[in-house]
Amino acid sequence: MRYAVCVKRTTIMLPDEVDARLRLEARRRGSSIADVAREAIERQLPPPATEGSLSFFSIGEGSPRDASERVDELVAKAVTRRKSRRTG
C-alpha cells in the first residue's frame, strides 16, 4: 500500500513481543514494517467522515408531526447547525 498523499513520520513504542510479531508479518508478506503498521492502524480506526455528512439523523419524540413530509428541510437545518458549530 503506497500513499500518494503527504505522510507524517511518527514514532511509537511497542512491547518487544508486538515488535517481533510486526516484523515477522512484514517479512511473511514481503512488505515493509511501515506498510503493515499502517494497514493495522487503518483497520482499527473508524472511516473518515465525508465532508458535510451527518453521522446519523433521527426523528423521534418531540419532532414535528409533519417531519416525514419535511425531512429535506429538517436535514438541511441540521447540516447548517453542524457547520456553524464547527466554524463558530
Image (spheres, rainbow, N blue to C red):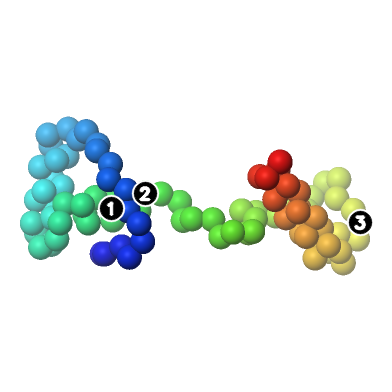
Q: Earlier in the sequence, mark 1 or mark 2?
A: 1
State which quarter of the image contains the N terminus.
bottom left
Q: Nearer the viewer, residue 61 or 72?
A: 72
The residue sitting at the right extreme is 65
Percent x, y of residue 55: 61, 53
Dot 3 alpha-carbon crowd within 10 angstroms: few under 14, some 14 to 19, many 20 or more: few
Alpha carbon of mark 1 to alpha carbon of mark 2: how far? Answer: 10 Å
Question: Disc 3 marks which amino acid?
Answer: Arg
Tell me whether the residue at label 1 lies in contact with that at label 2, contact meaning CB atoms closer than 8 angstroms: no
SS category of the residue bearing label 3: loop
Q: Nearer the viewer, mark 3 or mark 2?
A: 2
Numbered mark located on residue 44 in the image: 2
Alpha carbon of mark 1 to alpha carbon of mark 3: how far? Answer: 48 Å
Q: Earlier in the sequence, mark 1 or mark 3?
A: 1
Question: Disc 1 marks which amino acid?
Answer: Arg
Q: Nearer the viewer, mark 1 or mark 2?
A: 1
Dot 2 alpha-carbon crowd within 10 angstroms: few under 14, some 14 to 19, many 20 or more: few
Reading the image, the residue beneath label 3 is: 65
Q: Residue at x 83, y 46 (%)?
A: 61
Percent x, y of residue 83: 70, 50
Residue 24 vertical position relative to residue 5 in the rendered view, above or below = above
Percent x, y of residue 6: 35, 57
State which quarter of the image contains the C terminus.
top right
Reading the image, the residue beneath label 1 is: 38
Q: Residue at x 22, y 33 (%)?
A: 13
Question: Disc 2 marks which amino acid?
Answer: Gln
Q: Nearer the viewer, residue 83 or 43?
A: 83
Left or right relative to 25: residue 58: right
Q: Nearer the viewer, mark 1 or mark 3?
A: 1
Q: Residue at x 10, y 63 (%)?
A: 30
Q: Earlier in the sequence, mark 3 or mark 2?
A: 2
Left or right relative to 43: residue 2: left
